[in-house]
Amino acid sequence: KAAPTRRAFLAATGLAAVGGLALPAILRPAVAAPEQTLSLRPAPGTAPLVGAPYEPTPVWCFNDSLPGPEIRLRQGQRVRIAVENGLAEETGIHWHGLRVPNAMDGVPHLTQKPIAPGGQFSYEFEVPDAGTFWYHPHQRSSEQVGRGLYGPLIVEEREPPRVDRDLTWILDDWRLTEKAQISDDFGNLHDASHAGRFGNILTVNGRQPQPLEARGGERIRLRLINAANARIFGLDFAGHRPQIIALDGQPVPPHAPPEGVVVVGPGMRTDLILDMTGAAGSRHQVTDRYYPRQTYQVTEIAYADRPLRDNAPDWSLALPPNPLAEPDLDAATRHEVVFNGGMMGGRMMQEMGGPMASMPMARMQRMMQDGRMWFVNGIAADGHAMAPVLTLERGRTYIIAMANATAFPHPMHLHGHAFRVISRDGAPTPHREWRDTVLMTPGERVEIALVADNPGDWMFHCHILEHQAAGMSAVVRVA
Ligand code: C2O
Ligand code: CU
């Protein structure tokens, strides 16, 4: 049933043997056929978010499963994903972090027409980068993602580092009523103007977190994906020394997280190597301590009585690099982007130079009356289709200097590209990590650098989905 690959096509025509010889153009398929066809159907369903004695909670999910089915591809593979919309509203599916052609990016009204209820759209692309990615709708994301539409998308390295187990945790929180129903106050003004929609229960892979059963000496690769609308996680694997090997799917020199806390903001991913060094039979808490006054237990690690091996293995941790264009900082053009808006205390307002140092008060008030609370260079977006905030020339290097002039953290996500995070508050970052989503703390200045090598109109937005809906969204054009 799989469509033939280009190699199979060449073999079948007896042409593979010509090796390096150029073929006449007519014999070359314009694009390789997909090696795999998958189907996704977003639709209402149910999931046991809380577990007994509660009935399963009505959710929206892919293929009757929460999270949606894991899409697992090999680096460089071409895939076709047929989406059929089983929702009662329009949608479009975005492949978060994948560098796909613009028309496949899944942003309704910007890169494609929305998929109508009952309608279909086929996405087809190659995956240039190995790593941990995810997929989710990009239409009314606060509610569509918030009700459970998301799934993992893993692209395997050609030569993955050796581990005993490769696990994925999709983290999410849910705002449930006492009857374990999703509270339907999506888009309320308080969430929109403050830190976004926080939940009151936590799930890992769509369920109450189960203990991580481990054996001494075991090496686990743990892929963390934050699918929550607004909650930033800061996981502490007390008693263990996790090594971060990739951020947003992109390899980074292996290093321990600062202060031992693995911070993953909405939309972001972190790949860890966890060497299971606990004693036989011991139990260890995994806590979330991002928000200082809200530390709570996420799950625990439970050790079996017999170790797998006596010591942690000494296998190499490093991941092979992805084929990203290296920014040429000496030749870079610099742009500034300022984020304003949201609720602010009076002192904050003063320190930031007034409510919006750069924009007229009357225009701001008009937009806020509309529920548009957040501003990117003075504009609060209303939907996806809009004039670009930046136009970048294809193939050139850019430094985008971003300033968070608000009282809230924001995970800022750029589509279609990975960028290096080169400085924070003027200091060079130690790892110059590649990312597609960068978390900015209140008042923070962050510089990112990228080669604008993927043509098209790309979303650039806060991944706190209520902020995105309330205006914290812009378009970056690469032409
Ligand atoms: Cu994960 Cu524009 O989104
Ligand atoms: Cu935000």
Image (cartoon, rainbow, N blue to C red):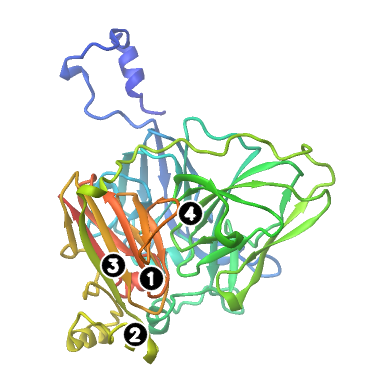
Q: Nearer the viewer, mark 2 or mark 3?
A: 2
Looking at the picture, how far across and down is residue 193, in whole percent? 37, 81
Residue type beneath disc 2: Glu
Q: Where is mark 4, residue-wise?
A: 269
Answer yes or no: disc 4 within 8 Å of ligand 1: no
Mark 3 nearby-residue class (10 Å; few <14, some 14–19, many ≥20):
many
Point 58% across, 52% down: residue: 256
Point 55% across, 59% down: residue: 258
Residue type beneath disc 3: Ser
Task: Estimate the spatial distance between the alpha carbons at disc 1 and disc 2, rounded to whole Å.
Answer: 13 Å
Residue 451 appears in view: no
Q: Tell me if label 3 and label 4 are in contact, CB under 8 Å.
A: no
Q: Where is mark 1, residue-wise?
A: 444
Residue type beneath disc 1: Glu
Viewed as shown, does residue 248 lie left or right of 301? left
Question: Does 233 appear above or below 111?
Answer: below
**Quadrant that contains the N terminus:** top left
Tell which circle, 1 or 2, labels the residue nearer the N-terminal end. Answer: 2
Q: Nearer the viewer, mark 1 or mark 3?
A: 1
Mark 1 nearby-residue class (10 Å; few <14, some 14–19, many ≥20):
some
